[in-house]
Structures are given as C-alpha cells and as structure tokens.
Amino acid sequence: MMASQEQVLEGLADIVNEIAGVPQDEVELDKSFIDDLDVDSLSMVEVVVAAEEKFEVKIPDDDVKGLKTVRDAVDYIVKAAA
C-alpha cells in the first residue's frame, strides 16, 4: 500500500491520540514523541504495533529506537510501505 507522507502523518496522529490521548492537531512532524508528546516507551511500543497494522509494514525493534520524532516515524513508514 503506497501511503503519502500526509496520509501517514494523519494515521499516526490518530494512533497517538488513541494510545496517548494527544490531540491529533498536536502530532506534527517536528515533535518528539517523548519530549513533546509525552509518549513513554511502553506507549511507543503500542504506537509501533498499531502503525505496523495500519500501514502494513514491519518495524524491527532495533529500528524503533531511531524513531525519535514524528518525522522519523513518518519517513520510515513511507519508505517501508513503498
């Protein structure tokens, strides 16, 4: 499934809202999951699992550590889904 950066951002915003209670409009590309959105490591695992299901991609545990910002995650998912 080809997903645009905008579609992935929108989907991630829904996921982060559902899991961490962060309003969708606050989930922006330059925000850090931990510092800006208060997504702790446990919630981050839930976000990753939900994103894998939603976008039909696999995100190995080693790669999750590199997903510090929303942009990191969006770029990763767009590339993995291509």
Image (cartoon, rainbow, N blue to C red):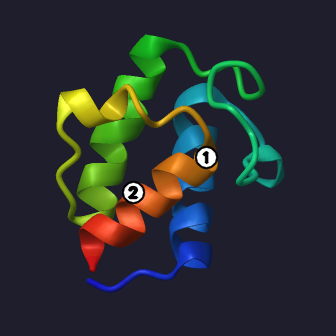
Q: Secondary structure at mark 1?
A: helix
- Residue type at mark 2: give it: Tyr
Residue 16 sits in quarter: top right
Q: Secondary structure at mark 2?
A: helix
Instruction: Tell which residue pokes out farthest to the right in this image.
Output: 25
Q: Residue at x 28, y 36 (%)?
A: 63
- Residue type at mark 1: give it: Val
- Left or right position of 25 against 47: right
Q: Position of residue 47 (x, y in %)?
A: 42, 36
- The local crowd at label 1, few if under 14, some if 14 to 19, many if 20 or more residues have their Cα within 10 Å, is many
Q: Which residue is mark 1?
A: 70
Q: Which residue is mark 2?
A: 76
**Is residue 7 depicted above or below 80 in this figure?**
below
Residue 27 numbered mark, or none: none
Q: Residue at x 17, y 38 (%)?
A: 60
Q: Residue at x 41, y 33 (%)?
A: 66
Residue 40 sits in quarter: top right
Q: Earlier in the sequence, mark 1 or mark 2?
A: 1
- Left or right position of 24 against 60: right
- The local crowd at label 2, few if under 14, some if 14 to 19, many if 20 or more residues have their Cα within 10 Å, is some
Q: Position of residue 61 (x, y in %)?
A: 21, 28
Judge by depth and name the residue closer to the eye, 10 or 2: 2
- Left or right position of 56 against 36: left
**Is residue 48 depicted above or below 42 in this figure?**
below
Q: Position of residue 36 (x, y in %)?
A: 78, 26
Q: Position of residue 65 (x, y in %)?
A: 37, 25
Judge by depth and name the residue closer to the eye, 1 or 24: 1
Q: Quadrant of the N terminus?
A: bottom left
**Is residue 20 depicted above or below 82 in this figure?**
above
